[in-house]
Image: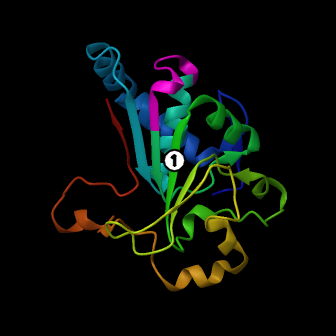
Amino acid sequence: MFKNKTSFVGGGNVNLYFYQAFLDIWNGGMRDDFLTLKNANPGFELWVTGHSLGAAMASLCAGYIAYMGYIPGDKIKLVTYGQPRTGDLAYANYIDNTIPFAYRIIHQDDLVPHLPPLALEIGDLSNYTHHKSEIWYNNNMAVGQPYIECDANESNQCSDQLEGNLFNMLKEDYHDYYFNVSVMFAVHGCPNYNPGRFIIKT
């Protein structure tokens, strides 16, 4: 899945699978819904969020909307949960320079934000990097628990310090629990919920 990259409109290269998934949804009706809401609510901020695959798509969505000039980057709030590395350094820099309010929230030893690993230097699998900023909860994320903020694309002060032992991350399932809410809650009562989705709120 991480092998193939493609150019991103704002700059750099991004994962082809993630970008195509976003474009399919965007062109399949989201663009029209977004523009209808934007035009009905001029001046509103835009919040874009998602978990896992939805987090990568949310990052691409926010960057795309800013590049297209639909909403200025400083009026976009991007917050993701368990986001995998989505593109290369040029893409990360584009998000950093375009969307000041961008936060990647990571729960303890969640493996997904470390995919593909930084140490992987095999052709097209190399050069992936996160955009900033990381909010790392090295705990159970209960109300009042502390977190560390790292205002860098990648920082050993946050969850990157765990990258030397990725196999240990497989022992616990931190990816499916954020703020003590299971991403699988829908299995028990939300019939149309998709755990890989991303959400646009105006």
- The residue under the point 56% across, 47% down is 18
Is-magenta flag for residue 18? no
The chosen color scheme is rainbow
Q: Quadrant of the N terminus?
A: bottom right
Closest to the observer: 108 or 5?
A: 108
Is-magenta flag for residue 71? yes
Magenta highlight range? 67-77
Residue assigned mark 1: 103
Closest to the observer: 179 or 188?
A: 179
Q: Position of residue 9 (x, y in %)?
A: 65, 27
**Residue 54 position (above or below residue 118):** above
Closest to the observer: 42 or 68?
A: 42
**Residue 22 position (above or below residue 86):** above
Could you tell me if residue 21 is visible in this image? no
Q: Position of residue 115 (x, y in %)?
A: 64, 63
- The residue under the point 47% across, 50% down is 80
> Is 150 on the left-hand or right-hand side of 44?
right
Q: Which three-letter amino acid code belongs to the residue tagged 1?
A: Tyr
- The residue under the point 55% across, 38% down is 60
- The residue under the point 62% across, 64% down is 158
